[in-house]
Image: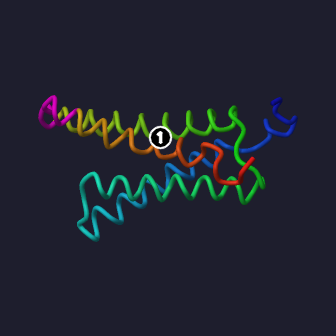
Amino acid sequence: MNEPATANRVPVSRLALSGVAAVIVLNLLLRTFSKLGGVLTTLVIAATVAGGMALWFFAQQRRAPMPGERLRLLGVYGGVLALLYLGLLALMAFKDDPSPMGLVIFGLHYFCYPLLAWLALAGRFGGR
């Protein structure tokens, strides 16, 4: 129930930033070169990155992330992606005001990433 003393030394920020980089690269590759788009592509990218982060954590630590580690990882991952999405939204607003439904769809695209990361890191991978 208590976290081990070494739990604070796990570099979850580096893993979260690597996940953000993977999201950017996969979005560029799938949406630009293969001309795929929509929610299905977002779900594929979000699931791939979330599964990759969970597997990488388990491979490095040989255990599932502790609740504090999971919270920090999701905070950095979701926070950096939120800043990037807000920047993209600002660019969209400069060009033309997005409709309310466009904002809802835009928000749903964003929330796929932290939601699937939360599900992947929920402790079911390495078994406790």
Asked if residue 36 lies left or right of residue 79, the reply is left
- For disc 1, the marked residue is 114
Asked if residue 21 lies left or right of residue 122, the reply is left
Residue at position x 33%, y 65% in the image: 30
Is 44 rendered above or below residue 12?
below
Amino acid type, label 1: Pro
Is 63 rendered above or below residue 95?
below
Is 27 rendered above or below residue 90?
below
Which one is in front, 1 or 56?
Answer: 1
Asked if residue 97 lies left or right of residue 54, the reply is left
Q: Give the x, y percent position of residue 4.
A: 86, 36
* Quarter of the view holding residue 11: top right
Is 107 rendered above or below residue 121?
above
Q: Give the x, y percent position of residue 26.
A: 41, 61
Q: Give the x, y percent position of residue 55.
A: 63, 58
Residue at position x 35%, y 38% in the image: 85
For the record, the magenta segment spans: 95-103
Q: Give the x, y percent position of residue 29.
A: 36, 65
Residue at position x 70%, y 43% in the image: 65
Question: In the rendered structure, does residue 29 fall within the stretch colored magenta?
Answer: no
Which one is in front, 4 or 30?
Answer: 4
